[in-house]
């Protein structure tokens, strides 16, 4: 039996629905249709009345989820694409994210965001939204990079008493497969050393972890041992693991699929420079997408986001410094 | 609390009606006196930030609050001091929030009208108009899951909020889900400085109901009797499973958007029309006419309320303000997931 990243997400939701009567799924096309990405396939049938179709109303979808959470439920909201969550942005950042701080009443909502680029998807079906959500206090932002993490972190997201923005990468949906579901996992909040190294640290998250691992493989025959850190969550960031890695290697390259202004890569570098300046043997570097909307044409799309080629080039540059 | 207030057909109904009317009037008067007090404190610099009054809206608001039952949900807005009190808010909660006491329900983290107790069905507003309606929807939706029946939710909005996407999405959602929502629109003719002629183009906000597939009622917001009757009917229908009810009340805002706003833009013709009458005076005249109240009793009630208010204000003013150095600067419930790196 092997399962894809997408199937792991479906299995996690099935388990959540089965184990906890307070859980329900709400979003566009999630019911009988099984969701635009098929993440909820068969769940409406298996759990009648718990997987419900919403109108095209991301604001009201989120507001309803907050109300249901106040009443003790544990809603899972599926935004059809991360890009559309901006229509519900107000309810996410000003309602869900402030409820606990203002009232001491927790808001256990999980918002699933199918995010990240796939070829041909264009500007409005490709965005990475983790930066804007991580910026707001009151949210937890998860970016699983593996099939196992997609499963265990979604389960943990539902169990967490705070609003969780669960960024599931669309490119990884069918691309990644695993033998079986995990029986144990790193907890949310801990980063993972995806590849041990000595000469340089690449910090990445989600789909970029795989690009970074590919780059590390390319550099190995040249004698470079590159350590790859998979952040797993971008809010909170496991700064300790990142710092320990930089302590070992002295060189840092951060890779993110999001746009260059600010973002996870800037945040990592800011922390490492301010708290671990002495650990660095060279200026820290970062690689992001180009500062334009995500293009449609594959020629343009392939140049827009970091790939393992771009990472290898940036890494060689950093190793030479 | 009275569920449906029609012209009393029995002596028992008549008594209940009069008791409800008197109770609502008392909440209206309390709200007015409390608002006056906050205005005075604001003018003398004792309140930090905005002061927002509900002058002119007391009848509509008190009617909603007094007819709601324990276990119902209420999402009041800016001008609902009367409804909040009628729904069970204490004067002390209001005083503590306005005066920045650390012991208030918001603990200084939010202020003035942004207050509530969510787990008691009393939702604290966020400033984005229209946003609270879908939250009420969510509570009602969850109760259905939990097989809790018989409760309703009231969301209060103004004419301005009806222009928001949030209003549209939430009313549509409530209609699709056939939720027991009573959406009360206080059309007080102005959204801050914006007159209704610049806010919407339809003839009557109640006409929107047809577009959503819901029932609507219009009511004279200056007439407590009519408000009790209309809101009572809408609540009965909602509780009976008829789906969302839209109630559109017509009145005039008798204060600025906030106390910082002199509201010179209000059309004097409106002020002098029947729309501009003071619902508190109307209710007093109604009670005096029907000999449910005499002038002496009115004076006594007023003095009692003033004493209550002054006691609450005095207490709140003596209480400590929040201390930034003992404050836990954490916005999530899950302690171990809050960021551990130090900020400068």
Image (spheres, coloured by chain):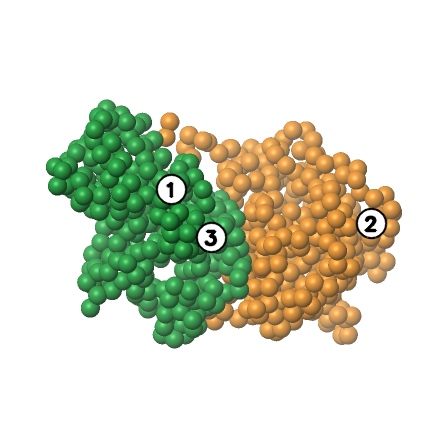
Chain colours: A green, B orange
Question: Looking at the rendering, which quadrant does residue A9 occupy?
Answer: bottom left
Residue A234, x across and y down, in percent: 34, 44
B49 relative to B167, above or below: above
Residue indicated by mark 3: A124
Report how far apart the C-alphas of labels 3 and 1 lie in the structure: 15 Å
Q: Which mark is residue A289?
A: 1
- Label 2 crowd bin: few (<14), some (14–19), many (20+), radius 10 Å: some
Mark 3 against mark 2, which lies toward the viewer? 3
Q: Is residue B303 visible to us here? A: no
- Tell me if label 3 and label 2 are in contact, CB under 8 Å: no
Residue B193, x across and y down, in percent: 73, 42
- Label 1 crowd bin: few (<14), some (14–19), many (20+), radius 10 Å: many
User: Which residue is rendered at x = 32% and y = 35% of the image?
Assistant: A286
Image side of residue B131 versus residue A14, left or right: right
Q: Which mark is residue B276?
A: 2
User: Which residue is rendered at x = 79% and y = 37% of the image?
Assistant: B264
User: Which residue is rendered at x = 33% and y = 55% of the image?
Assistant: A171
Q: Can you say which quadrant of the picture contains the C terminus of chain B?
A: top left
Image side of residue A80 versus residue B1, left or right: left
- Label 3 crowd bin: few (<14), some (14–19), many (20+), radius 10 Å: some
SS category of the residue bearing label 3: loop
- In the depicted view, which residue is nearer to us: A96 or A262? A262
Whether marks 3 and 2 lie on the same chain: no
Q: Can you say which quadrant of the picture contains the N terminus of chain B?
A: bottom right
Question: Looking at the rendering, which quadrant does residue B37 occupy?
Answer: top right
SS category of the residue bearing label 2: helix
Image side of residue A280 versus residue B196, left or right: left
Question: Looking at the rendering, which quadrant does residue B221 occupy?
Answer: bottom right
Which of the chains bears the disc numbered 3?
A
Report how far apart the C-alphas of labels 3 and 2 lie in the structure: 49 Å
Mark 1 against mark 2, which lies toward the viewer? 1
Which of the chains bears the disc numbered 2?
B
């Amino acid at each position: 039996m092997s399962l894809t990243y997408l199937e792991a997400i479906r299995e996690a939701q099935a388990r959540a629905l089965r184990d906890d009567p307070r859980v329900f799924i709400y979003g566009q096309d999630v019911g009988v249709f099984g969701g635009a990405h098929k993440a909820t396939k068969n769940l409406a049938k298996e759990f009648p009345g718990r997987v419900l179709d919403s109108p095209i109303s991301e604001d009201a979808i989120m507001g309803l989820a907050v109300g249901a959470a106040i009443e003790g439920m544990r809603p899972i909201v599926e935004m059809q694409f991360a890009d559309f969550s901006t229509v519900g942005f107000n309810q996410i950042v000003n309602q869900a994210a402030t409820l606990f701080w203002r009232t001491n009443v927790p808001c256990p909502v999980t918002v699933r965001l199918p995010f990240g680029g796939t070829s041909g998807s264009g500007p409005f079906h490709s965005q990475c939204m983790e930066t804007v959500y991580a910026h707001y206090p009151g949210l937890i932002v998860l970016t699983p990079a593996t099939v196992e993490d997609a499963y265990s972190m979604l389960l943990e997201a539902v169990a967490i008493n705070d609003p969780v923005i669960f960024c599931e990468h669309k490119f990884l949906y069918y691309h990644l497969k695993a033998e079986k579901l995990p029986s144990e996992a790193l907890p949310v909040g801990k980063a993972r050393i995806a590849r041990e190294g000595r000469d340089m640290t690449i910090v990445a998250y989600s789909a970029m972890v795989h690009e970074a691992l590919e780059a590390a493989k390319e550099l190995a025959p040249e004698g470079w041992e590159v350590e790859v850190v998979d952040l797993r969550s971008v809010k909170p960031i496991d700064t300790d693991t990142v710092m320990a890695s930089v302590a070992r290697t002295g060189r840092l390259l951060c890779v993110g699929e999001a746009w260059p202004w600010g973002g996870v890569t800037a945040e990592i570098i800011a922390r490492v420079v301010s708290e671990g300046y002495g650990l660095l043997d060279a200026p820290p570097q970062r690689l992001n997408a180009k500062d334009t909307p995500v293009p449609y044409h594959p020629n343009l799309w392939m140049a827009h986001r970091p790939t393992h080629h771009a990472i290898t080039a940036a890494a060689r540059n950093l190793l030479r410094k | 609390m009275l569920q449906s207030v029609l012209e009393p057909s029995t002596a028992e109904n008549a008594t209940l009606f009069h008791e409800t009317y008197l109770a609502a009037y008392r909440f209206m008067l309390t709200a007015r006196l409390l608002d006056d007090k906050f205005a005075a404190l604001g003018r003398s610099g004792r309140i930090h930030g905005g002061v927002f009054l509900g002058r002119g809206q007391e009848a509509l608001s008190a009617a909603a609050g007094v007819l709601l039952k324990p276990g119902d949900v209420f999402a009041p807005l800016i001008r609902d001091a009367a409804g909040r009190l009628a729904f069970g808010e204490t004067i002390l909660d209001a005083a503590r929030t306005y005066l920045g006491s650390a012991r208030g329900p918001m603990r200084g983290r939010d202020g003035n009208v942004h207050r509530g107790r969510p787990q008691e069905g009393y939702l604290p507003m966020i400033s984005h108009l229209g946003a609270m309606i879908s939250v009420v929807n969510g509570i009602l939706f969850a109760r259905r899951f939990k097989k809790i029946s018989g409760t309703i939710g009231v969301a209060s909005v103004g004419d301005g909020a009806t222009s928001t996407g949030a209003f549209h999405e939430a009313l549509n959602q409530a209609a699709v889900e056939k939720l027991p929502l009573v959406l009360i629109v206080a059309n007080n003719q102005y959204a801050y400085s914006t007159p209704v002629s610049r806010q919407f183009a339809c003839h009557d906000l109640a006409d929107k109901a047809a577009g959503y597939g819901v029932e609507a009622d219009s009511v004279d917001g200056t007439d407590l009797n009519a408000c009790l009757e209309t809101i009572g009917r809408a609540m009965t229908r909602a509780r009976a499973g008829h789906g969302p009810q839209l109630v559109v009340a017509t009145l005039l805002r008798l204060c600025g958007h906030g106390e910082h706003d002199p509201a010179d833009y209000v059309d004097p013709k409106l002020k002098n029309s029947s729309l501009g009458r003071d619902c508190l005076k109307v209710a007093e005249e109604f009670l005096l006419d029907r000999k449910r109240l005499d002038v002496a009793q009115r004076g006594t009630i007023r003095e009692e309320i003033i004493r209550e208010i002054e006691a609450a204000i005095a207490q709140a003013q003596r209480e400590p303000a929040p201390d930034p150095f003992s404050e836990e600067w954490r916005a999530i419930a899950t302690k171990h997931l809050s960021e551990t790196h130090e900020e400068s």
